[in-house]
Image (cartoon, rainbow, N blue to C red):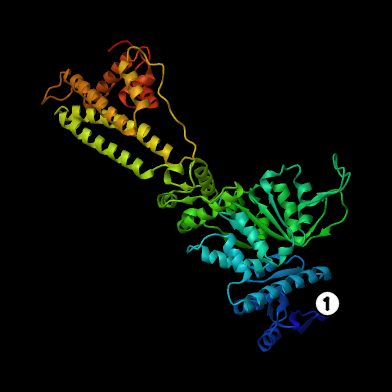
Amino acid sequence: MTTTALVVDDEVDLCRLMQITLTKMGIKSDVAYTLSQAKSYWQENDYDFCLTDLKLPDGSGLELVKHISGSSTTPIAVITAHGSMDLAIEALKLGAFDFVNKPLELPRLRQLVESALKVIHQDNVSKSTPERSPEQQMLDSRLIGDSAVMHPLKNTILKLARSQAPVFLSGASGTGKEVVARLIHDLSPRRDGSFVPVNCGAIPSELMESEFFGHKKGSFTGAVADKQGLFQQANGGTLFLDEVADLPLAMQVKLLRAIQEKTVRAIGDTKEVPVDIRILSATHKDLNQLVQAGNFRQDLYYRINVIELKLPTLNARRDDIPVLAKHFLALIADEWQLESPPTLTDNACARLQDHDFAGNVRELRNVLERAVTLAETSTIDASHLGLPNIDSHQEVITSACQNISTNKATISNASVSNKSESSVADSIQDNAIKSKVETDSTQQAKANIHPYRTTTQHYPSMNTSPASPRLAENSEKTADKSVASSLDASINSQADKQDSLSKSVHKEDVTAGHLPAQGLEHYLQEQERRLIITALKQTNWNKTQAAELLGTTFRSLRYRMTKLEIAEDQSES
């Protein structure tokens, strides 16, 4: 069956040239000179693809692109004048297959038509296949998952594969951006060409131009032979720019011209060479914020971000974790040459689904590789995964907090009846308990909540003074006991301090019914001053140990000493 095409342009000579070129390629074509005539031809006839100019006498070619893309899957390419890249990008967003610049170059026109014919052939094969098409089978076998967020993603990938528009893949690290980029290439008419991935952040800035565009022999010191750049290697295929946000500004200008003009010039060469490539780019950073901060060129951003495809995190597709785990275990068994693929127990599978994957799919594979290594048999249990038991740890924290509340209420009931004295006691007690909970319980929970996140472990001081045996005993208990035991020890310590506080308060001459002569604020500051000096004396004026004894921080103690005018070498009580 003869392929037919619709050519739309108001220039008679250009239409005649395109018609002759298509005829030599065995394609029958009809010519329309206005938008209304093109719509009439489109309704009366069936065409395999369409070529249209963007500027027509009675309207815009964008209207025709929207009309055809909204009613059929027929490839439609646009012809744009030099300097009208914004209109071409808008056409690609509306569903155009590709674009070609004026003045029209016949080799570029032939490449565009051949790509359109490949898309037509793929569509015909898909329609003739009663079951799933080969493209759909490839998509399901390489993009694992059948959750709700994956269905629209797969449909979008199939649509993007038919187009030649630049695609920007956004998403967190480990979501599979390169996997999707390879899929778009393998499902596209460029599948016979090369897929060239490049990590933009891994190339030194001094070598970046040579790596992208190549160089000629003798162009600089060390150029002992001609070198083909990445753009030339990807000619006829796809160039995938991973971590494109790491490109330096000087390189962004040169990359912009190469993408816009589709020509490159090697270092030391005197002429530009045309290249036929499709640009796919990706980064885990927010390019929009980088543009606003001036770290990424806005014009390049709009060139590579014609169509944005956002990839979901693994936490957003937890239903796919069992299938992904089975897939990765099969790959691990094949790579490690195991006799049979390992299997997950129900508990292990449920634990994986409950885990918060900060590293997404990449972290899932790392967890499974560790589990296969640690498991003695081919059956992987939850204990082999090496993931923290969040539920049991949360129960320990909750129980400890309940004990704190109970002991706090007991201590409050046993405190002195005077309101001002009770206020001082509660204030010291609250500071001590809150500090202990924050430093021991909360930090321990954060440290165990995720094994991949870096935390700082604080160890008890070994320089304990002989004058403070209780501090040494508490340090040993903290090192040997669990979080709950440490908190209980802290409660007992706070009760002792509260008793000492009550005795100290009763030594004052303030009795029931008599108020302090110099006011409540002065009275409270004096009591606080006495307690701090007592703690400092017990620790030989070691402020770090005194802060631990009072249940506060070193920084807070220094602030209070300055406020209360307590000198470091003060000897008075």
Residue 9 or 210: which is nearer the viewer?
210
The residue positioned farthest toward the front in the image shown: 339
151 to the left or right of 540: right
Residue 423 or 330: which is nearer the viewer?
330
Secondary structure of residue under mark 1: helix
Q: Which residue is mark 1?
A: 21
Q: Residue at x 53, y 66 (%)?
A: 152
460 to the left or right of 89: left
Residue 285 appears anywhere in the view: no
Q: From the top left corner, tell me how far across and down residue 237 is, in percent.
A: 73, 61
Q: Quadrant of the C terminus?
A: top left
The residue positioned farthest toward the top in the image shown: 571
Quadrant of residue 422 in the image?
top left
Is the residue marked by circle 1 packed among few (<14), some (14-19), or many (20+) residues within 10 Å? some
Q: Is residue 513 above or below residue 70?
A: above
Q: Is residue 369 above or below residue 89?
A: above
Q: From the top left corner, tell me how far across and down residue 556 is, in percent.
A: 37, 27
531 to the left or right of 291: left
Number of numbered discs on residues = 1
Q: Quadrant of the N terminus?
A: bottom right
Quadrant of residue 499 in the image?
top left
Q: From the top left corner, tell me how far across and down residue 305 is, in percent.
A: 63, 60
Which amino acid type is marked by label 1? Thr
Quadrant of residue 263 in the image?
bottom right
The residue positioned farthest toward the bottom in the image shown: 44
Q: From the top left corner, tell me how far across and down residue 270 is, in percent.
A: 88, 53
Residue 246 appears anywhere in the view: yes
